[in-house]
Image: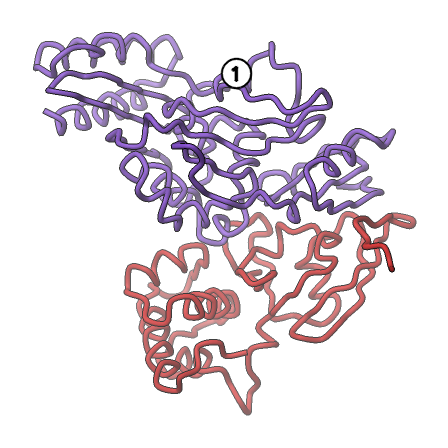
Chain colours: A purple, B red
């Protein structure tokens, strides 16, 4: 924070991006600031405050749920629309973030732009097959959430591009989902494990299954082997045990500690058994 | 027509910002390294307390543009144009806010360090939800830590204040 020379508070995403790109000095965009304010790189001289951008919404668009990048955790926690979507998992996840005071300030955009492994939303958005709209100097790009942290995506949100909104596809609206955060205390920022589980069944057959894991590795990941075992199958003790075994292997591949693996596997087993 | 300002530039590392504190227009000169908590205290608003300085304890809570927020996490220059309420803006010794009265009457104050933040969080809760359940009070105050008590009397105080405010037909106490 020692070297901030310019402070801008633009009112449109275009002006904010111009604020990031147009000065010769290093720039950074900040919304809620709960993760960024105390840890600004000393090389940053240009502070672009996103608080005035009209991106604080949670709304439906064409069957999808759309969350603006500057929607706070509190707004998402209390959104009637989010509470009705995917069993309310998005609101429930927002409510598990730290304390009310943090939830009043922190935004979903900041939570995914600064990819701390313990953040709340990465596992949730990965599990819900979310897409992200990002404003870059070459225009607006809509990319799968999973692509946001891949090297092929050449932009750095908050530095040379801006996250505009997150799109949760309509197909997930009626999924049964659960989010679990395993941390030292309920209010701890740094979770040891975040776990998203989502399932969509028809006539007793699993049509869609998502198990997304956060906090174990720099980026969240999907336990795809476990998902594959149950996809298209009926829930039966044999298939559930096989999926649990595969989840354990997925977690071993991520070098999860034994106790985190135990917690994740137990939570998954409980979630699946409730569906039987 | 005057062009709307959308930026400030620091002079020798100092920003001059205009803001509203407890309903009064103020101008602060703040260093680019300074956080709102330090600036407020330097300008005499010492009701905002410096506890953890990392956003964990809630002692520095102020109402920032209508919502309780952690002043220790807000770079001071970003308060330009903001409306802030500190505990000094809520009531006086002669005319305390119903929440302040309720905290005293319930014996909810021991060392008192966390109380300004707790009262400001409670005030906002009662502004948006005049009749909160115990669970809602607990959830709303989960960021305001108290190391003296077990929170029982503070929750009782918030309930009592809610009842008093509903009786007076006054929800916003400022």
- The residue that appears at 9% across and 10% down in the rendered structure is A238
Chain ID for label 1? A
Quadrant (top left/top right/bottom left/bottom right) for the C terminus of chain A: top left
Say left or right for A189 vs A228. Answer: right
x, y (%) of residue A204?
Answer: 11, 19
x, y (%) of residue A235?
Answer: 11, 16
Q: Among all residues in the image, which is located at the extreme front?
A: A62
- The residue that appears at 39% across and 47% down in the rendered structure is A77
- The residue that appears at 46% across and 49% down in the rendered structure is A75
Q: Is residue A260 above or below residue B133?
A: above
Total numbered labels: 1
Residue placed most toward the observer, B86 or B20: B20
User: Residue A36 falls in which quadrant of the image?
Assistant: top right
Say left or right for A176 vs B158. Answer: left
Say left or right for B171 vs B137. Answer: right
Residue placed most toward the observer, A103 or A129: A129
Q: Is residue A25 above or below residue A238?
A: below
Q: Which residue is mark 1?
A: A147
Say left or right for B121 vs B78. Answer: left
Q: Among all residues in the image, which is located at the extreme bottom?
A: B94
x, y (%) of residue B45?
Answer: 67, 71
Quadrant (top left/top right/bottom left/bottom right) for the N terminus of chain A: top right
- The residue that appears at 72% across and 72% down in the rendered structure is B44
């Amino acid at each position: 924070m020692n070297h901030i020379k310019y402070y801008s508070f633009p009112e449109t995403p275009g002006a904010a991006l111009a604020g990031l790109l147009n000065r010769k000095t290093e720039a950074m965009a900040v919304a809620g600031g709960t993760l960024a304010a105390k840890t600004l790189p000393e090389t940053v001289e240009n502070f672009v405050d996103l608080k005035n951008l009209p991106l604080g919404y949670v709304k439906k668009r064409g069957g999808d749920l759309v969350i603006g990048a500057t929607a706070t955790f509190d707004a998402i926690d209390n959104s009637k629309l989010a509470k009705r979507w995917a069993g309310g998992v998005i609101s429930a996840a927002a409510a598990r973030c730290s304390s009310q005071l943090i939830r009043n300030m922190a935004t979903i955009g900041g939570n995914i732009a600064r990819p701390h492994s313990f953040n709340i939303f990465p596992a949730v958005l990965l599990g819900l097959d979310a897409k992200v709209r990002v404003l870059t100097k070459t225009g607006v790009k809509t990319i799968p959430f999973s692509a946001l942290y891949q090297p092929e995506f050449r932009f750095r949100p908050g530095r040379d591009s801006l996250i505009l909104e997150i799109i949760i596809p309509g197909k997930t609206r009626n999924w049964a989902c659960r989010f679990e955060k395993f941390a030292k205390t309920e209010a701890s920022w740094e979770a040891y494990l975040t776990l998203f589980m989502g399932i969509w069944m028809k006539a007793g057959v699993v049509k869609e299954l998502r198990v997304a894991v956060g906090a174990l590795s720099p980026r969240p990941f999907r336990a795809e082997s476990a998902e594959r075992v149950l996809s298209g199958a009926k829930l039966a003790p044999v298939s559930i045990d096989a999926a649990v075994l595969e989840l354990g292997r997925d977690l071993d591949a991520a070098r999860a500690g034994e106790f985190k693996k135990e917690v994740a596997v137990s939570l998954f087993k409980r979630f699946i058994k409730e569906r039987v | 027509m005057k062009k709307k300002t959308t930026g400030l530039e620091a002079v020798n590392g100092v920003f001059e910002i205009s803001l509203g504190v407890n309903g009064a227009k103020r101008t602060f000169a703040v260093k680019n390294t300074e956080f709102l908590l330090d600036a407020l205290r330097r300008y005499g608003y010492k009701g905002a307390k410096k506890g953890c300085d990392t956003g964990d304890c809630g002692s520095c809570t102020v109402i920032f543009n209508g919502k309780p927020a952690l002043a220790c996490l807000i770079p001071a220059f970003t308060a330009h144009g903001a409306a802030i309420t500190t505990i000094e803006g809520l009531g006086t010794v002669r005319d305390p806010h119903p929440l302040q009265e309720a905290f005293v009457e319930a014996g909810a104050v021991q060392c008192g360090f966390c109380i300004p933040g707790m009262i400001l969080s409670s005030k906002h809760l009662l502004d948006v939800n005049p009749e909160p359940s115990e669970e809602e009070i607990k959830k709303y105050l989960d960021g305001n830590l108290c190391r003296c008590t077990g929170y029982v009397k503070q929750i009782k105080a918030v309930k009592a204040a809610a009842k008093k405010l509903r009786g007076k037909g006054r929800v916003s106490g400022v």
